[in-house]
Image (tube, helix red, strand yellow):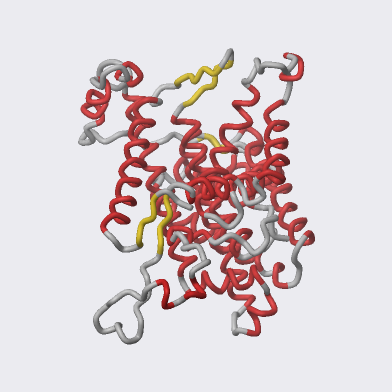
């Protein structure tokens, strides 16, 4: 039983959401100014680095995993080729910015439709094949991408094996009071030292500015997907995930919505690629291999298949767990020699195995269970037909068959879990 129960639409429920949003925005500001330069997190004898560069990469991965949520989590198609579209968006944006002198934001108008069209074409075979066969076809795309961008015929566009370098024009505008905000944080008692001293350097200001831009781009992507899932096409793709035959009998156009979901997922992958290359300043073939495609699937499963917030968790897991686990040199009770070598992917694999048994719905499912014990948002009670004109709520003893049904959280309406807790396919 939850300690606090909030009724949907009441002032308390709205205040709860406003406070949550305020804390989230405050956390973003704190992180942006605290880690504009590389910071260190010390646990036991281990030192872990945190920087806005790593956080920006996490945002890129989050957007790509969000695309996988559309095609895998909500449509139920086992697609493993997201790194192909991620790399396509990165290289196309790098070429437009470096060779055609486009601003980064303007590349969205080209990358999104191109990646959508490519994803739509890839979705056509999905009308005939599914399951492991579809997974193999899409994984093949991810496997050939590094070779494809190194072809001699594309060398003038991709720079071959050396990678496509690009100079960033994302510099902080002069009207943005970043120094003033930093000064406010520096005056906080006991914690001001973590925000530096004095005005920000130009590099730090540029990092903060890019972090804000990428966060806004990611937020817009989540807003679009959230509205898509609530819409009629969203209900159609979820019906396909649950049962294709029933969806077809109900009038759902399978080919239309399957190809649409592939297109949307690929477009989001392309947007993630833009963020990635805009932060790193180079698109290298080795960064977009089939290993990255597998990492995207791991992030999807670890975060939670069929949940929007699971994409956030998955993106951070991909960005931080391999690096931090490789930086771990001291764990009580574990021989030091076991922590040497490529422990990053090892820990990521063990985490996936552990979550499969402990939290089959992903980390988000565990967080929801914990949250339900503290706060629960209850839908507004229905009104009886007799009292419909007066708006009088229908009392609980008027509907005894609903007494044992736990009220649902309306925030979870956007993040329906799939019919099975296991990954689709």
Camera sees residue 151: no
Q: Position of residue 373 (x, y in %)?
A: 48, 48
Image height of 334 relative to 155, above or below: above
Tell me the quarter of the picture where residue 74 sits.
Answer: bottom right
Question: Of all residues shown, which one is farthest toward the bottom?
Answer: 386
Q: How many marks?
A: 0
Q: Position of residue 417 (x, y in %)?
A: 58, 60
Q: Residue at x 32, y 20 (%)?
A: 191
| Residue 275 relative to residue 76: left or right | left
Please state, as top left, top right, bottom left or bottom right, where the C terminus lies in the image: bottom right
Q: Residue at x 60, y 35 (%)?
A: 163
Camera sees residue 305: yes
Camera-side residue: 307 or 397? 397
Question: Of all residues shown, which one is farthest toward the front?
Answer: 397
Q: Residue at x 40, y 54 (%)?
A: 220
Q: Position of residue 296 (x, y in %)?
A: 63, 46
Camera-side residue: 279 or 227? 227
Tell me the quarter of the picture where residue 307 sits.
Answer: bottom right
Tell me the quarter of the picture where residue 239 sits.
Answer: bottom right
Camera-side residue: 148 or 156? 148
Q: Position of residue 12 (x, y in %)?
A: 29, 54
Q: Residue at x 43, y 58 (%)?
A: 411
| Residue 345 relative to residue 277: left or right | right
């Amino acid at each position: 039983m939850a300690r606090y129960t909030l009724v949907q639409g009441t002032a308390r429920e709205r205040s709860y959401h406003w406070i949550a949003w305020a804390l989230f925005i405050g956390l973003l500001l704190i992180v942006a100014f605290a880690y504009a330069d590389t910071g260190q997190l010390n646990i036991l004898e281990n030192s872990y680095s945190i920087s806005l560069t790593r956080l920006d990469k996490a945002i890129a991965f989050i957007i790509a995993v969000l695309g996988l949520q559309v095609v895998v989590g909500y449509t139920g198609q086992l697609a493993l080729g997201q790194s192909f579209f991620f790399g396509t968006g990165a290289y196309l944006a790098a070429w437009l910015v470096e060779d055609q002198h486009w601003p980064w934001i303007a590349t969205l108008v080209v990358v999104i439709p191109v990646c959508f069209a490519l994803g739509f074409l890839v979705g056509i075979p999905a009308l005939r094949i599914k399951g492991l066969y579809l997974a193999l076809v899409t994984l093949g795309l991810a496997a050939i991408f590094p070779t494809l961008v190194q072809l001699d015929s594309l060398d003038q566009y991709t720079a071959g094996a050396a990678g496509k370098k690009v100079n960033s024009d994302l510099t902080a505008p002069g009207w943005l009071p970043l120094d003033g905000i930093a000064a406010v944080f520096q005056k906080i008692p006991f914690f001001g030292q973590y925000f530096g001293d004095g005005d920000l350097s130009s590099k730090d200001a540029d990092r903060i500015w890019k972090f804000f831009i990428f966060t806004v781009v990611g937020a817009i992507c989540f807003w679009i997907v959230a509205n898509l899932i609530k819409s009629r096409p969203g209900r159609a793709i979820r019906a396909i995930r649950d049962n294709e035959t029933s969806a077809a009998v109900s009038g759902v156009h399978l080919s239309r919505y399957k190809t649409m979901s592939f297109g949307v997922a690929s477009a989001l992958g392309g947007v993630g690629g833009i963020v990635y290359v805009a932060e790193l300043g180079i698109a290298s073939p080795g960064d977009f291999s089939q290993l990255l495609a597998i990492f995207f699937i791991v992030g999807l499963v670890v975060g939670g298949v069929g949940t929007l917030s699971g994409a956030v968790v998955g993106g951070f897991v991909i960005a931080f767990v391999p690096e931090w686990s490789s930086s771990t040199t001291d764990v009580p009770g574990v021989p030091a020699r076991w922590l040497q070598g490529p422990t990053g992917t090892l820990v990521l694999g063990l985490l996936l195995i552990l979550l499969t048994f402990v939290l089959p719905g992903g980390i988000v499912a565990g967080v929801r269970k914990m949250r339900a014990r503290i706060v629960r948002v209850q839908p507004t009670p229905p009104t009886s037909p007799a009292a419909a004109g007066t708006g009088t709520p229908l009392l609980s003893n008027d509907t005894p068959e609903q007494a044992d049904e736990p009220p649902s959280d309306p925030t979870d309406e956007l993040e329906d879990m799939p019919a099975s807790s296991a990954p689709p396919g």
